[in-house]
Amino acid sequence: MEIGSQGAMDVLDPASDTVIASVPMCGASEALSALNSAFEFQPQWEATPPAQRADVLRATAAMVVARKDSLARIITQECGKPLAEAAGEVQYSADYFSSAANEIHALNDTHLDLQRPGVRGVVRHRAVGVCAAITPWNFPLAMLARKVAPALAAGCAQLAKPAEETPLSAFALAEILLECGLPPRCLHVLSGDAKAIATTWLMDGRVRKLSFTGSTDTGRLLLRQCAQEIVRCSMELGGHAAFIILADADIDLAVKGALQAKFRNAGQTCICPNRFLVHESIASEFTARVAVAAAQLKIAPGMEAGSQIGPLIHDAAVEKVRSHVADALARGGKLICGGQTKQLPDLPDRFFEPTVIANCDPSMLCFTQETFGPVIPIMSVTSQKEAIDVANSSPFGLAGYVFGGSDSSTRSVAQQLQCGVVGVNEAAPSNARAPFGGVKYSGYGREGGAWGLMEYVTTQYLALRSLDK
Ligand code: SIN
């Protein structure tokens, strides 16, 4: 068993509380050694031709796919999501590597006609320098892939701190990158004391960029530290998506979309819909149908065949969901299905039933805070304007959804939503080739495609007067 300067920590399967591994509990000393190593190696990686960097990324994408089964099992064991979803996450992670490799041409110089005799302009995209990634437990492989892939593509050495609950996916990815030819000093993954590691990296002055996915509160703390050394940041913070269903929506499609978007990872997804705003003319029918479908989902450990709802990550998550349900019911919400945990024999009481609550309103906790659990709170609205106003009244703005029968009105509603990602009659908008990120309290910066890559470069403009005859 490997030990860090602060000892070791157990990684638990949230479905059973079984210890599945023990990993080093690293602290400030390991963080500093990793930073020294990455900083010294940075110029070498930056000078490696982009095509060669892209080769490593393409090989990584291929190997991630080739190891889909074993990676999916690691994800399911440490974060609890159903195996089929974990396999989807593995493919999603591989896509970030191929996308970063495919976009590497965006780093080419741009030549400018300055319209001045004898002087021409060249715009270069230079690696920002050593980067730090701090990633969450809900997508332990994909959230790291979408930071590491563009950072390496841009020529940055990368430091990474995975969530305490889920370090194993990160170690597995680092191993694959090494096997695919990444020089070892380019990537350092440290499990352990988040505060000590982050503080060492961010207050040192040699880390030039932080990419963080996690809660808005933690994001604020990290931003304060980053302010000291003017560290550039990408912040993918909490979400509170609205799921708007217009009067002319195809109800079958809306029910299917609601289940797909809401119950992914048992509702523990930043882009999960949290507020269902349904036109009053179809609210009862939608509510009844979504409840029937939700009640049929199979609740079981993620490793069990056919599981659709796995455990929540820990007991505090269960308590939060319970408190949101209790608050909604106390304020006049009507429980249509679920509302409590399902106790499975010999397993921790962490499996929350898919829950549907009608008669919700914006005063309820589930309408003001991210529930991060399998709850569909439904408010009926009288107009598109009311739906848009309620949706935009949240200080969060990561994702939103609009379901309706006409392309022009759904698109018009989508364009009025204050959020970075909108699914229009589409419940799974995330894609490694597209920009992902939020506005307002949901943060800033984009991940995915060329947008993600450009977050890891600085722009240098050269005004070149040539003296050659
Ligand atoms: C997240 O929960 O932050 C990631 C969700 C996604 O990429 O679709």
Image (cartoon, helix red, strand yellow):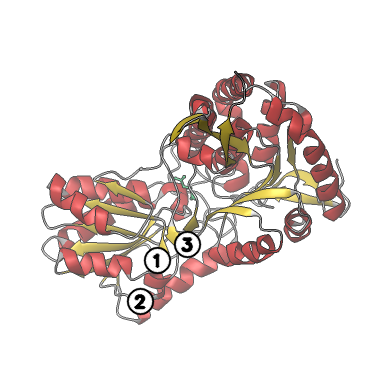
Mark 1 lies on a secondary structure that is: loop
Image x and y of residue 68, in percent = 55, 27
Q: Residue shown at 41%/37% (left/top)? A: 431
Image x and y of residue 337, in percent = 32, 62
Mark 3: few/some/many CA within 10 Å (<14, 14-19, 20+):
some
For the question of whether residue 346 can be seen, the reply is: no
- N-terminal of the pair, mark 3 or mark 2, is 2
What's the residue type where badge 1 is placed? Gly
The residue under label 2 is 329
Residue 437 relative to residue 462: left or right: left
Residue 57 relative to residue 362: left or right: right
Mark 2: few/some/many CA within 10 Å (<14, 14-19, 20+):
some
What label does residue 457 carry, if any? none
Q: Residue shown at 27%/45% (left/top)? A: 256
Q: Residue shown at 50%/40% (left/top)? A: 452
The residue under label 3 is 341
Whether 303 is drawn above or below 280: the answer is above
Pointers 3 and 2 in contact (CB under 8 A)?
Answer: no
For the question of whether residue 48 can be seen, the reply is: yes
Image x and y of residue 75, in percent = 59, 40
The residue under label 1 is 339
Pointers 2 and 1 in contact (CB under 8 A)?
Answer: yes
